[in-house]
Amino acid sequence: MSTFQTDIAELDQLREKNGSAWDHINSESAARMRLQNRFKTGLDIAKYTASIMRQDMNEYDADSSQYTQSLGCWHGFIGQQKLIAIKKHFDDTSKRYLYLSGWMIAALRSEFGPLPDQSMHEKTSVSALIEELYTFLRQADARELGGLFRTLDAARAAGDQAAEQAAQKKIDNFQTHVVPIIADIDAGFGNAEATYLLARQMIEAGACAIQIENQVSDEKQCGHQDGKVTVPHEDFLAKIRAVRYAFLELGIDDGVIVARTDSLGAGLTKQIAVTQTPGDLGDQYNSFLDMEELDISAMSHGDVIIKHHDKLMRPKRLPSNLYQFRPGTGEDRCVLDSITSLQHGADLLWIETEKPHIGQIGGMVKRIREVIPNAKLVYNNSPSFNWTLNFRQQIFDAWSEAGKDVSAYQRDALMSVDYDETELAAEADEKIRTFQSDSAREAGIFHHLITLPTYHTAALSTDNLAKEYFGEQGMLGYVKGVQRKEIRQGIACVRHQNMAGSDLGDDHKEYFAGEAALKAGGKDNTMNQF
């Protein structure tokens, strides 16, 4: 017996128990509402999605072609439409997640207005967006199930048993729109206690995976900008533990922590690490500092010196009071960051790179896996990269190294439309197309995401609409460029009243008031024409 049928039987027993007072309560209607609201709390969602991520991680370990993907969202409606589209095109949400970008919250969701990605936005806006996303995904479940219930009712009314059985089967095998969200907590918005408090709120909203980075909270920068400042390992590990304690306190034992290192592009630190013995974590961190050996007699007023392997060393301190790492140490620091994070409670890694280059990423992962054999990455397929130029230059360099004639191309001008139909451009596009599968196989990338795609798609589509509607095309600019395409592509929200919950409201009115219900979906509803 399906869960739906079990609920009906259970509700029938309740009706019998409560006697005539429940005569007008319909067990199947109540069972429908239960099914449409399967997830009662954010913790229900976090438990469910954490188990999905853990299963996906195990499947990737067995077969690297089983990688996962997500796209970043900045509004619940965007996340909802993404999952509706995925179900429409692929009939399956498996291994397809959502990503919650701190950058997009800062730029689009702050009460201060648009902000740079520097953790200046309200920290509670992170958990608020998680809750909003899942509210819209749960509504997508209720909406789709409502349509299936109406199909079931129509089949019963027509006496069509085959259609009734087919509708019931779809109801029994319904796949939810609720999928894992990897949620960005930036650098924790403060000390370890602040990190714990926000992590707990994010988990209560439904997050099963929290991504945290090793920058200084009050110096936080976007991973693709200059000026990044990292913290010593022990500081970062305390925050990782804080997130784990938040998961465990709330009963999400399978919660996933993604440890992000920005060390590749971060040449600065705010602190000299505490070290007790040669070779400990603090000593390893300090060994990357740009230092000079110094006799105490040569010290200047205000100098800071440390004893490092029986030598007195002066770290290079900038006017900003920050300390500088030696140039060229970024990869070594990334590898150490990654290994120590996994050894102290993280589940997945995120290495923020300056370009999407499989060789570079794979080289670091190989070193990490010498210590942690099943190390896996989450990777930002960032819109900050110029993918076209980067990959065309990679092909240009590969051809040059192989001795192939590249005289028809100017390396610095490869972004030009003049090269779009060339052999080099075609080969570069193929490398972009297969980047995710290639890097999953060769560089240990379990999860591919694009942080800001819907920020850019919203801007692009709005630009196209504004150009046509406010120009000579007028109303045709909207009809031809938007509505006609929506209808022909079967976009669900073309019936925007239905998408906003009008039909769900009609169902409830009928449950509550029966034939006396005043419903919105009658013959005079103009959306009947779609």
Image (tube, rainbow, N blue to C red):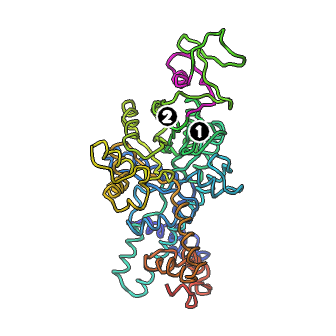
Reading the image, the residue beneath label 1 is 228
Q: Position of residue 514 (x, y in %)?
A: 58, 83
Q: Name the side, left or right, on which 261 lies relative to 390.
A: right
Disc 2 or 1, which lies upstream in sequence?
1
Query: In this rendering, is residue 214 above or below 445?
Result: above
Magenta-colored stretch includes residue 404: no
Image mark for residue 82: none
Q: Nearer the viewer, mark 2 or mark 1?
A: 1
Could you tell me which residue is drawn at 40 percent across and 66 percent down? 2
Reading the image, the residue beneath label 2 is 341
Q: Name the side, left or right, on which 387 lies relative to 128.
A: left
Q: Quadrant of residue 283?
A: top right
Per the image, label 2 sits on a secondary structure element best described as helix
Could you tell me which residue is drawn at 62 percent across and 75 percent down? 21
Disc 2 residue type? Ser
Could you tell me which residue is drawn at 30 percent across and 57 percent down? 423
Per the image, label 1 sits on a secondary structure element best described as loop
Q: Main secondary structure of the magenta part?
A: loop
Please tell me how crowded label 2 is: few (under 14), some (14-19), or many (20+) other residues with Cα within 10 Å: many
Q: Quadrant of residue 305?
A: top right
Could you tell me which residue is drawn at 39 percent across and 76 percent down? 167
User: What is the span of residues highlighted in magenta in the rendered image?
Assistant: 267-290
Q: Name the side, left or right, on which 298 lies relative to 423.
A: right
Mark 2 → mark 1, Cα distance in angstroms: 19 Å
Q: Position of residue 139 (x, y in %)?
A: 54, 67
The image quadrant where one finds the N terminus is bottom left
Residue located farthest toward the bottom when viewing the structure as drawn: 523
